[in-house]
Amino acid sequence: MTPTVILITFLAYTLLLFFITFLTARRASNRAFFIGNKSSPWFVVAYGMIGASMSGVTFMSVPGWVGITQFSYMMVVFGYLLGYFIIATVLMPLYYRLNLTSIYSYLETRFGFWSYKSGAFYFILSRVIGASFRMFLVVNVLQVFVFNSWHFPFSVTVTIFIILILLYTLKGGIKTIIWTDTVQTTFMLLALILSIYFIIQNLHTSFFSITCDIFRSSFSKMVFFDWVDKRFFLKQFLSGVFIAIVMTGLDQEMMQKNLSCKSLRDAQKNMFTFSVIMVFVNFLFLFLGAILFIYSARTGFALPLRSDDLFPMIAINNLGPIAGLVFVIGLISAAYPSADGALTSLTTSFSIDFLGINKNENLSEKRKTKIRYMVHIGFAVVLLFVIILFSAINDRAVIDKLFTIAGYTYGPLLGLFSFGLFTKYSIKDRWVPLLVVISPLSCYFLSKYSEVLFNGYKFSFELLIVNGIITFAGLLILRRKADLKTER
């Protein structure tokens, strides 16, 4: 494929999103931006959340990851199922009962000002880092296969991408994203299925034959029993449970879409439907990864230094122009949901949790809109700089790095919400900011020296659970004396 064809495809797809924005964002209010006027059809949200949850990370990083971890990621995915069930039956009823727009305002009601601000801060930190990692994948592909040939610097490519996302999310917010996500999910799933088809055709084999080859190979190994291995099945499963809880249930971006449904019942139907579909889609991505490595072995294709580059290099350079075009469309459709949703949720959280525009009765609707626009643009600039910074230090599979960072930044949220839901204690709220700094630092120390401290044990994604436990334990120490006396 020529750089010109890739660029035209990218621009055509972007124009389609702008058309959807035009249809959905007319006369959009602040309420429409934040929670879609609570009128989103649950089945549309469920379908669109597939693309939003997957993003460019799943599209590129998961297939390449198969070479290192085989199919062990499926144990994480099975853990997701239990995590999504907990979200639907524990967290969603709470959010709907309190009629929340920002889910972190629960922490203010439960504990106080500093807990609230600490929770909102960790979401913003988590989402800025996570969204930047995801967007880097896509921007890097556009840079390598399009803009390098025209000698455009990486910073210019990132800027173009961010400006386009900014323009089509600025007005409609979550109301627009609910519908653009459905289009993007459709293209992503089509690209996944067609990519598998094109590789099988190129290998001159059949789907049945390649399936047998995969399950006879080492790639299909799913369950690892060595407890010190990062792929140990039990810690993978438990990590999946808590990754789902924190990266969906305690994440403003994902919950904002669920809170836009008409009722709790609709939101729960959305979550149950979405969770089942996600298992099959994730398996297909691992299946694709195994096929890519089999293709490399049979054709003599040299594996790239970074596993994330395997899929794009084969799709664009080796499978013909149609397969390359399908890949580009799939990648773009997987990337936009993570970027637009992140920008909208960051704007929502900062506007409500830190600026309090929903509580300030002295602000007119016009003034609130102006503030929201400024915040939206501000976070676009922040994402721009973080992506550029990440491009200079990226050295391993993005999905691995993404879940590692999540263990540090989402752990305090897990501890705060767990303590609020499962105890009745009040706490010394002013000490919470210190606690949520100590907890991730303690986890970093444990992770760095775990092999020495725990007889060769290596922490993986379960570091998130440890972080949550440390935060929970710290909150127990911060219990108010009055509660202890009552307990006695």
Image (cartoon, rainbow, N blue to C red):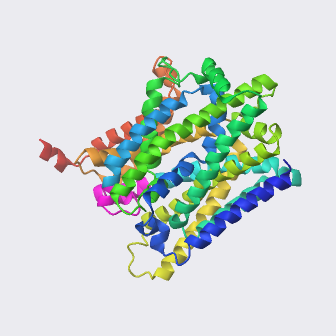
Q: How many marks?
A: 0
In the displayed structure, 180 sits above or below 192; it is below
Query: Residue 10's x, y, as percent?
Result: 74, 57
The front one of 301 and 269 is: 269
Q: What is the chief secondary structure element of the magenta stretch? A: helix
Query: Residue 481's x, y, as percent?
Result: 19, 48
Residue located at (83% from left, 54% from top):
5
In the displayed structure, 76 sits above or below 273; it is above
Query: Is residue 111 a member of the stretch shown in magenta?
Result: yes
As drawn, the residue found furthest toward the right would be: 150
In the displayed structure, 181 sits above or below 465; it is below
Residue located at (39% from left, 55% from top):
267
Residue located at (59% from left, 26% from top):
69
Query: Residue 16's x, y, as percent?
Result: 67, 64
Query: Residue 144's x, y, as percent?
Result: 80, 46
Q: Is residue 436 left or right of residue 66?
A: left
Q: Is residue 382 left or right of residue 315?
A: left
Residue 194 in view in this figure: yes
Q: Which residues are magenta?
A: 94-121
